[in-house]
Image (cartoon, grey):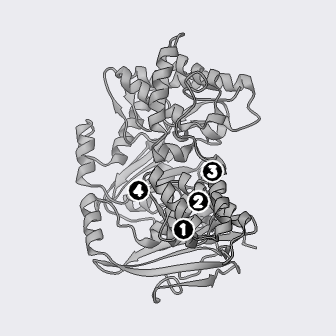
Amino acid sequence: MPRSVPRTATVFRPAAHQSGGWAEVNPAFAERFRALGIDSAAGFLELPGEVVSGHPDRHVVRVELPEFATAFYLKRQHAVTWRERLRTWAAGFGRVSRCEREAAVLKELQVSGLPGPQWVAVGGDGRGRAFLLVEEVAGATDLRAALGDSVLSPAGRRALAARVGWVIGRLHAAGWSTPDLTAKHLFVAPGGGLTLIDWQSARRLPSLPRAERLAALAALHASVADDLASTRDRLRVLRAALNARCVAPVARQIERLAAKARTRRSIRDQRQPVVTAAAQRLVWVAGEAVCAVPDVAAVWQRPAVAAPFYGCEPATLRTELRDGREGVLIRGRSVAPLGRFVAALRGRPWRSPGVTLGRVLFHLERYGVPAPRLFAFGQRLTGRATAEWFALHELPGDAVPGSVEPHTAEQLGRALRRLHDAGCRPVGEPLAAFGVTARGAAVRDVTRVRLVRKVSRQARGHDLAALAAAVPEWSRAAVEAGYLAGPRERIVARSPVRSLPVVAGS
């Protein structure tokens, strides 16, 4: 059995007393951070924690520190590009990083008494990296989790719906517009208070156009799964946000906008069950060289960057963690001068095949697609065009037997359907991507799965035909039956009469 996961602060230690760059600390927190020796950009950028969300050029780390009763969230940018500075300048914030832009917004919100997180520190190291540290709202959960709480009474749901609409109405009345007004960015505190996070793309106008108000309400509506919100409570949000009693015509317009929004991957991700998404956290054991899930980070070898993960020939092999768990290690080397050059032009870190494999496994887990659990992944640059990388996951299921019986074929059809509905396709022969476990068919070879922007009807038909052709003739009908019976995320929502802006089940 794996050892219990210690507090993150005991896994790492922040690098204190480092100089370089600049850092502005909120006066309410400055003295305590100074007592910890963290008063420079480098010290803040290297604070310890678990990565709770991320993008190629930035990620968010949850940080726990001694002397503080509440945790913090560290937004860490790996590269601040000229394009980003140009966008922030065009938005009226000057040629600054998105972290500085968000800090400026949070300061304005605080002065206006509007719901944003408490900013703690902001800065940059002078070498292209920037950060923003904000305080966690203790005990708060995002709107999806709050709505999924079976303890929440109908009266409580109605009150929450009205409060959500009222807060949105206040923000819009003050001229604030943000593309990140979605369910995962709206947090509900135990006392019922609301806090909207992620303001890095926000802007303030003298008067917010009605079109932007409706687009924001449509994005929020689309990001809440159908079973979490009743029609009446969604309409209650709309009435409170627009300060109007009759909203039927507007509701139909918002539903049309929401139907388009649901085709975006970011919105589809938010409509997935919250349980798996909340469990997806990473710890930087050795920077980007070793990123592991918390229970694996707690037992990772020392030194962290060493064999069998680095300094060895490319291979796929079975290995064992320090606590006895076995897994499959995929390691390799890359020579990618063009890819590295393009990434540098775009101002984004280059992503190795190992990082891509980790991303695919996390994505499959988020969408509930049966697949091996991710343990760790990483990359380290060894030259201007060369790199080493690895991905480590739990042992997969067995290979599909040579003679596929109808019940197994049906499970394969269901697995392919779930893969497609998650925005993925098999690479090459579809049957080679799958295996069988005690719970049914599952992804076995993650190197044979790729993320795509959209799985077209033609692509679905091609993959289904290829999978059916790979099984015996007497099992082909079962493959199609399993595929057609498989669950699928609803892309086009129900009619406006039964579905609308946000919140609660009746």
Q: Quadrant of residue 108?
A: top left
- Residue closest to the eye, 247 or 275: 247
Which badge, 4 or 3, is on the more N-terminal residue? 4
Q: Evaluate if marks 1 and 4 touch, with contact meaning CB atoms under 8 Å apart.
A: no
| Residue 310 position (above or below residue 64) | below
Whether residue 285 is visible here, answered yes or no, is no
Q: Residue furthest front?
A: 473
Q: Could you tell me which residue is drawn at 42 percent across and 23 percent down? A: 172
- Residue under label 3: 484
Mark 2 or 4: the one toward you: 2
Cα gap from disc 2 to disc 1, whole angstroms: 8 Å
Q: Secondary structure at mark 1?
A: helix
Give the label on residue 351, or none: none
- Callout in the foreground (4, 3): 3
In terms of secondary structure, where does tag 2 sit? Answer: helix
Marks 3 and 2, Cα distance to the nearest angstrom?
A: 10 Å
Q: Position of residue 398 (x, y in %)?
A: 68, 76
For the residue labelled by badge 3, is the local secondary structure a helix, a strand or a loop? helix
Q: Amino acid at mark 3?
A: Leu
Q: Residue furthest top?
A: 245
Q: Which mark is residue 416?
A: 2
First in residue order: circle 3 vs circle 2: 2
Residue 430 got which mark?
A: 1
Q: Which mark is residue 58?
A: 4
Contact, CB < 8 Å: mark 3 with mark 2? no
Describe residue 395's horizontal placement relative to residue 259 as left or right.
right
Q: Label 1 to label 4, Cα distance in Å?
A: 34 Å
Left/right placement of residue 207 relative to residue 68 reads left
In the rendered image, the quadrant that contains the C terminus is top right
Q: If you read the primary sequence from the N terminus, does the residue marked by circle 1 or circle 4 appear first?
A: 4
Residue 84 visible here: yes
